[in-house]
Image (cartoon, helix red, strand yellow):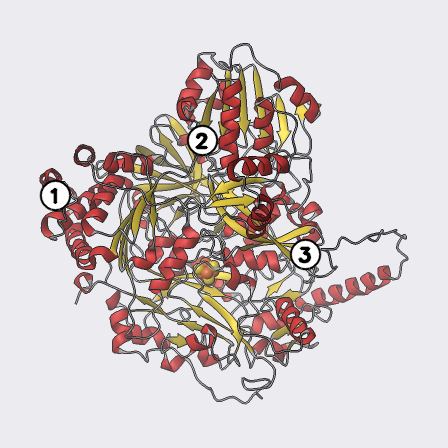
């Protein structure tokens, strides 16, 4: 483990001596390329200007503006528009409305509120009443609205290549079959939908020999199997991190990629945020192969190969149960003896970590919890149940019945389905929104076998890889066009209602199942309502139904706690499995597969917001790469952007390398979801298809891989991590809790008034609300939900990979990730960086046309009409948060044009070429609240204005409001000792104040 105390905190603060923070390995090593890039005031800014001088460029710009003016004199052809003849009573033009619905990902629903402008969904927010959301969202929810307007969505049903009508489909498949469904197979995504369960039952009544397969490449059956080992039933583990003082996460990215991660992030942050130096905070230990958002929040992190994680879990259990004294009656006595030899299975250098961790867990007792990631084998999950039972941590971890539906005896797994197809036992395969030709394990060769099925039916959003192999294709309704129901991870019934009529006559999976159930052609809404009427009944059904739809959920439907007692034989079996599973040889290379943080399993690969969203840890956009540790890269003789062949069991994938700090040696991390070859043209040619290496017996980890450099072959990676260098200055701060307690004033030099020759423009205390933001770095996980939320709210355009390579991404808010210490085990700080709305704004003094000015309520404003594009402001901004429209991105790129224009927020200008733009503190929301307050004859209330980033943030790391509302958290947090202003020495008086990150290290693991 790196000793973070060796970092010279005091010298880090003056930023002149000792380089404690770095953004990339290139910056750490000070490569010539980076020095050259950093030397440019605006990286990439003059890249296309060639030999043209700034003066010539300005002349040309002036001429083009004059011409634009001339063309503006032309008379446009007259267009007729048609007003509402009778305005719907619920529509007031200009007034937005919210509707509750749910978005389901691999069977687990998140409740959302969707903003609607005159019937047009434009923005997704969290539903504060929904347990999976608590008012916040993740990146997928935020980006879902762009998926609705995806111009590459399939628009019509077809049979073969010929257009076909839904009625023809109903006619062909609605009839009875002679074989009782013996050759009929369905392939679905996992779901918790009670309606789908009903319909499966009805299909089986008619076709009792039919079979159902649920497949999701990113989900694993291991947690359920682990619970089966430990408790004798495939239960689902639930957590409440508010009850946890000490957390051990074994390859468990519970803050970002596990189901319920938005809720878990909120709970974790509630116990993480420390209000004063004497306050308490939780402690997080993480063991994982690649650096995840959860790993980046760890107080102690062990980077280990996937095959070593089970050994570490067993060793911690052994220490805890044999030496830690945690032996409550629930732990089977026989299990303890089998644990003893497992203590020796970890590396000698890890033993102090394991012992100290076990002691800490034991000290925490019921306030300690062990959480295991889905990728880990069932035995590790069982061992975690053993440890949690021993710790009596039933407030932080408990089990419920599984919330996903099952087809019971009519269910089969994907391998069994593939085998049936191979044997010719399937004559009709109905695939419902499951791009299995792309995602199925390579050894099943499903794509090649599908053609052997006589009739292949596909319901999908896109004409993707699977659609290309199917003879019947039906366009699917987007989640925001559909009626349905689902369950949250805790079992809460969540309702799905459409925000818009299906744009392309899309159908839902329920409607397709109804056809096979031989039921009359019923609208999706009636199906759902009737199913609920049958289930719930009662004279008050209509009132119940209205209320459930209004709120998006049905109260009191969370799954109850299951009775759990450990099964001695199951625990013994788990321990035997762990004893038998030796870590792979030290020189073997292991592969770790993960769903991608942006495109997930590939289903979001045509969403340009997500493609351009920097990965939370690597900051890679528009690509995936083979992540390697610095040591492994050195041993293999490769560096970032080198193309390599990764070979596993005779299968090869060519992919570029990205050397990643904090990555385990001897491990290659591959993200799934790229290298698509369907009709989604934005996804085509982006990244590399890691599914090619994935087999059904090793879906998450595989040992025995080899990596070979492809001589002379390079692939450029569009990494935003190296943009906007900090030049060694103390921008993000992080100290251990002990240091904070000893020196609570450690940020004293980074705040307070500065002498200045410049006049104070507007200051706190003036009668108008003075807007400001406070951001707590201790609880920012880097998840980037705020970045997509800002993009959706403010019509921020996508620029594409070539422009990102020139540092021209347009995000108004970026998450800078700073590393400190040893690149093998770095400390990490995530810092949301946006316009600081400086009271003495350097950008304002240099604008020759007064395009950027200060508002009376403390906003640094941009008047787009005035901007002539000199970019002096951006050059003079020390925070590098201003974005210039080099091109007319609205029309230049397919990702900003066409149907996606329907997503635009009508309250925000869409900027054109040649203007500067940046964060406005969501001024449109401020003005809306002001108007509402004025109409009602009152002042704006505390907390009434919420910025888009603040609203999306799962951890509530961002607080916004008026400085005159002293009772808000935004104001209270600014008074904490660890608050500081970024680049305080510049005298800019930023309205954004940050709170330094505090790490709660275990004194036993800190070197003196
Ligand atoms: S501030 Fe942004 S990146 Fe940080 S936790 Fe909140 S949403 Fe995620």
Q: What is the CA distance from the residue labelled 1 to the residue labelled 3?
A: 61 Å
User: Residue 629 versus residue 670: which sits nearer the camera?
Assistant: 670
In the drawing, does residue 349 fall left or right of residue 202?
A: left
Q: What is the CA distance from the residue labelled 3 to the residue labelled 2?
A: 43 Å
Q: Residue furthest front?
A: 539
Residue at label 1? 344
Determine the residue positioned at 28% across, 34% down: 228
- Would you say the beta carbon of the disc 1 residue lies within 8 angstroms of ligand 1? no
Residue at label 2? 215
Q: Quadrant of residue 340?
A: top left
Sequence-wise, which precedes: disc 3 or disc 2?
Answer: 2
Say which quadrant the C terminus sits in: bottom left
Local crowd size for mark 1, using a 10 Å CA cut-off: few (<14), some (14–19), many (≥20): some
In this rendering, the answer to whether 914 lies above or below 420 is below
Q: Secondary structure at mark 1?
A: helix
In the drawing, does residue 69 fall left or right of residue 702?
A: right
In this rendering, the answer to whether 487 lies above or below 12 is above
Given this view, does label 1 or label 2 mark the residue nearer the observer?
A: 2
**Residue 956: % across, % down:** 45, 63
Given this view, does label 1 or label 3 mark the residue nearer the observer?
A: 1
């Amino acid at each position: 483990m790196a000793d973070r105390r060796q970092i010279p905190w005091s010298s880090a603060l003056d930023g002149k001596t000792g380089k404690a923070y770095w953004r990339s390995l290139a910056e750490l090593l000070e490569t010539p390329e980076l020095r050259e890039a950093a030397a440019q005031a605006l990286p990439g800014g003059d890249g296309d200007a060639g030999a043209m001088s700034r003066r010539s460029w300005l002349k040309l710009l002036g001429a083009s503006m004059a011409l634009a003016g001339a063309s503006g004199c032309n008379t446009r052809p007259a267009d007729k528009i048609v007003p509402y003849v009778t305005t719907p009573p619920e529509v007031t033009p200009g007034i937005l409305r919210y509707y509750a619905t749910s978005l389901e990902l691999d069977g687990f629903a998140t409740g959302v509120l969707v903003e609607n402008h005159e019937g047009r969904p434009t923005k997704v927010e969290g539903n504060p009443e929904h347990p999976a959301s608590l008012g916040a969202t993740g990146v997928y929810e935020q980006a879902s609205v762009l998926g609705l307007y995806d111009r590459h969505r399939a628009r019509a049903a077809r049979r073969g290549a010929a257009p076909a009508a839904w009625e023809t489909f109903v006619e062909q498949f609605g009839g009875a079959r002679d074989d009782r469904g013996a050759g009929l197979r369905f392939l679905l995504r996992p779901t918790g939908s009670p309606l789908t369960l009903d319909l499966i039952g009805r299909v089986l009544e008619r076709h009792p020999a039919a079979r159902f397969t649920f497949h999701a490449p990113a989900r694993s059956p291991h947690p359920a199997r682990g619970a089966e080992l430990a408790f004798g039933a495939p239960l689902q583990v639930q957590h409440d991190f508010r009850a946890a003082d000490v957390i051990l996460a074994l390859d468990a990215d519970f803050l970002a990629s596990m189901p319920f991660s938005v809720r878990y992030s909120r709970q974790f942050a509630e116990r993480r945020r420390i209000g004063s130096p004497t306050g308490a905070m939780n402690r997080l230990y993480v063991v994982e192969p690649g650096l995840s958002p959860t790993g980046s929040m760890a107080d102690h992190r062990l980077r280990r190969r996937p095959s070593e994680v089970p050994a570490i879990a067993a060793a911690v259990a052994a220490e805890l149960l044999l030496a830690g004294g945690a032996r409550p009656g629930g732990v089977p006595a026989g299990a303890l003896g089998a644990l003893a030899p497992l203590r020796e299975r970890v590396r000698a250098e890890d033993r102090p970590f394991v012992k100290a961790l076990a002691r800490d867990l034991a000290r925490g007792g019921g306030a300690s919890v062990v959480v295991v990631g889905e990728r880990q084998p069932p035995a590790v999950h069982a061992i975690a149940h053993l440890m949690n039972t021993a710790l009596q941590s039933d407030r932080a971890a408990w089990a419920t019945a599984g919330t996903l539906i099952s087809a019971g005896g009519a269910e089969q797994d994907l391998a069994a389905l593939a085998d049936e197809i191979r044997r010719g036992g399937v004559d009709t395969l109905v695939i419902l929104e499951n791009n299995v030709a792309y995602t199925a394990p390579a050894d099943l060769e499903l794509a090649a076998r599908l053609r052997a099925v006589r009739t292949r039916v596909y319901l999908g959003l896109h004409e993707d890889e699977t659609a290309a192999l199917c003879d019947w294709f039906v366009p699917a309704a987007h989640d925001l066009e559909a009626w349905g129901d689902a369950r949250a991870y805790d079992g809460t019934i969540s309702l799905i209602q459409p925000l818009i009529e299906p744009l392309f006559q899309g159908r839902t999976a329920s409607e397709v199942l109804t056809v096979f159930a031989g039921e009359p052609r019923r609208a999706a809404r009636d199906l759902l309502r009737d199913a609920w009427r049958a289930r719930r009944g009662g004279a008050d059904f209509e009132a119940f139904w209205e209320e459930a739809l209004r709120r998006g959920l049905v109260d009191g439907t969370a799954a109850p706690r299951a009775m759990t007692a450990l099964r001695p034989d199951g625990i013994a079996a788990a321990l035997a499995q762990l004893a038998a599973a030796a870590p792979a040889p030290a020189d073997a290379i292991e592969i770790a597969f993960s769903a991608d943080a942006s495109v997930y399993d590939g289903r979001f690969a045509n969403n340009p917001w997500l493609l351009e969203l920097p990965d939370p840890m690597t900051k890679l956009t528009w690509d995936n790469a083979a992540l390697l540790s610095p040591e492994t890269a050195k041993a293999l003789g490769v560096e970032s952007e080198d193309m390599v062949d990764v070979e596993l069991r005779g299968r090869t994938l060519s992919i570029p390398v990205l050397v990643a700090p904090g990555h385990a040696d001897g491990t290659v991390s591959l993200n799934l979801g790229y290298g698509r070859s369907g009709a989604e043209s934005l996804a085509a040619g982006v990244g590399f298809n890691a599914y090619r290496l994935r087999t059904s017996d090793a879906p998450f980890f595989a040992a025995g891989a080899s990596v070979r450099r492809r001589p002379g072959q390079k692939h450029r990676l569009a990494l935003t991590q190296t943009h906007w260098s900090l030049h060694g200055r103390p921008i993000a701060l992080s100290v251990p809790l002990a240091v904070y307690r000893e020196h609570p004033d450690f940020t004293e030099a980074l705040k307070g008034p500065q002498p200045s020759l410049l006049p104070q423009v507007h200051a706190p205390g003036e009668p108008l609300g003075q807007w400001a933001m406070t951001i707590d770095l201790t609880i920012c996980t880097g998840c980037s939900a705020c970045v997509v939320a800002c993009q959706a709210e403010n019509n921020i355009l996508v620029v594409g990979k070539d422009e990102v390579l020139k540092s021209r991404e347009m995000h108004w808010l970026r998450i800078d990730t700073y590393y400190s210490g040893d690149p093998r085990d770095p400390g990490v700080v995530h810092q949301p960086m946006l316009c600081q709305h400086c009271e003495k704004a350097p950008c304002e003094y240099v604008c020759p046309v007064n395009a950027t000015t200060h508002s009376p309520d403390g906003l640094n404003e941009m008047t787009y009409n005035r901007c002539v594009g000199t970019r002096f402001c951006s050059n003079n901004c020390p925070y590098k948060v201003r974005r210039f429209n080099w091109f007319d991105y609205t029309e230049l790129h397919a990702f900003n044009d066409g149907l996606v224009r329907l997503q635009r927020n009508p309250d925000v200008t869409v900027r054109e070429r040649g203007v500067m733009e940046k964060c406005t503190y969501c001024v449109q929301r401020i003005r809306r609240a002001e108007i509402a307050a004025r109409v009602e004859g009152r002042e704006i209330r505390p907390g009434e204005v919420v910025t888009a980033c603040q609203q999306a943030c799962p951890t509530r790391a961002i607080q916004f409001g008026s400085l005159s509302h002293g009772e808000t958290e935004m104001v209270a947090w600014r008074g904490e000792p660890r608050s500081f202003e970024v680049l305080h020495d510049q005298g800019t008086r930023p309205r954004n104040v940050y709170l330094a990150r505090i790490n709660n290290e275990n004194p036993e693991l800190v070197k003196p």
